[in-house]
Amino acid sequence: MPPKLDPTTAHLSSVYGPVHSWRVGSSLGIDLLLQTSICSFNCIYCQLGDIQNKTIARQIYVTTDQVERDLRLSAWEEADIITLSGSGEPTLAENLGEVIHLIKEYTHKPVMVLTNGTTLENADVRRDLMDADLVAIKLDAASEKTLQMMNRPVAGVTLAGIILGATEFRREYKQKPNRKLSLQCMFMPANLSEVSELATLINQIQPDEVQLNTPKRPYPLQWVLDSRGNHNAVEYPAVNLKTLTPQQAETLESALAAAIQCPIVSIYNKSHAEK
Ligand code: SF4
């Protein structure tokens, strides 16, 4: 049977990289959205720029057949890990679970999913994620106000719902062997005052690790497909973002390390892995 391909995306590849990630090494990206940028958030620092399709509806954007075709044509052997991320929120792809299964069967490499956590209240999404070896949930805000300001979610998404979904996912995911749950916290001057409230939420969710980050790239003024990968060499119109000073980063990391019960890995190269 010939593979089922969507004519609107068949000329593009759903696989990109491998690119280097400071968290996991050489990572091959899989983009299950591909048509444009699609997300339930519209973060003020998003490397994709202003999200083109702001939605929380799940559907199939790229067929599993197309991912299989693109994977076969890619340099997947060179990657340490296969990451589902790309042009937005990967859990909005209804074939996420099917694709994770395909990748593991074809490559035998660990699979990571980066999610903004907005769909974790949905039991179907949590089930889809169970076979991923690593899941990283974004958590930048410790208040509804900061969520609205930094992550700008679609209507109906609340911090309370995200925490509820993440806590339930943690409980279920823990029952599977050799799984790792991370929380990714992006810090900017805008959320620096919420460190202790964020620590309370982190301790409630009980991840295996917290990853501290700050925007490394300028905010693109428009969406370009290349912005899903390592676009250091890509030229596009962009504005610079406010990041933390080294002193602010050090203070933040020390305060968080003292208040939470799991290790921290940090883009600022400080590790609290002894905790
Ligand atoms: S969740 Fe990720 S893809 Fe979505 S807007 Fe935020 S940074 Fe961009």
Image (tube, helix red, strand yellow):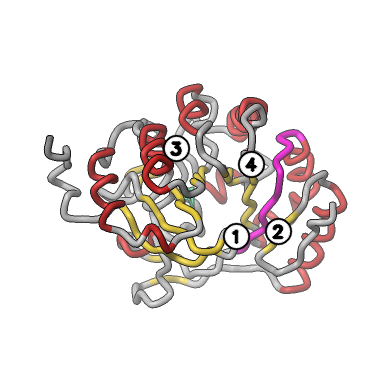
- Magenta segment range? 204-214
Query: Disc 4 beta carbon < 8 A from ligand 1?
Result: no
Farthest residue to the top: give it.
123
80 is within the stretch colored magenta: no
3D distance between C-alphas at marks 2 and 1: 8 Å
Residue holding disc 4: 181
Earlier in the chain: of badge 3 and badge 2, it is 3
Disc 3 marks a residue whose amino acid type is Val
Q: Verify CB contact (< 8 Å) between mark 4 and mark 2.
A: no
| Disc 1 secondary structure class | loop
Disc 2 marks a residue whose amino acid type is Val
Name the residue at 29% across, 34% down: 60
* Coordinates of residue 21 in the picture (x, y in percent): 53, 63
Residue holding disc 1: 23
3D distance between C-alphas at marks 1 and 4: 13 Å
* Coordinates of residue 99 in the picture (x, y in percent): 36, 38
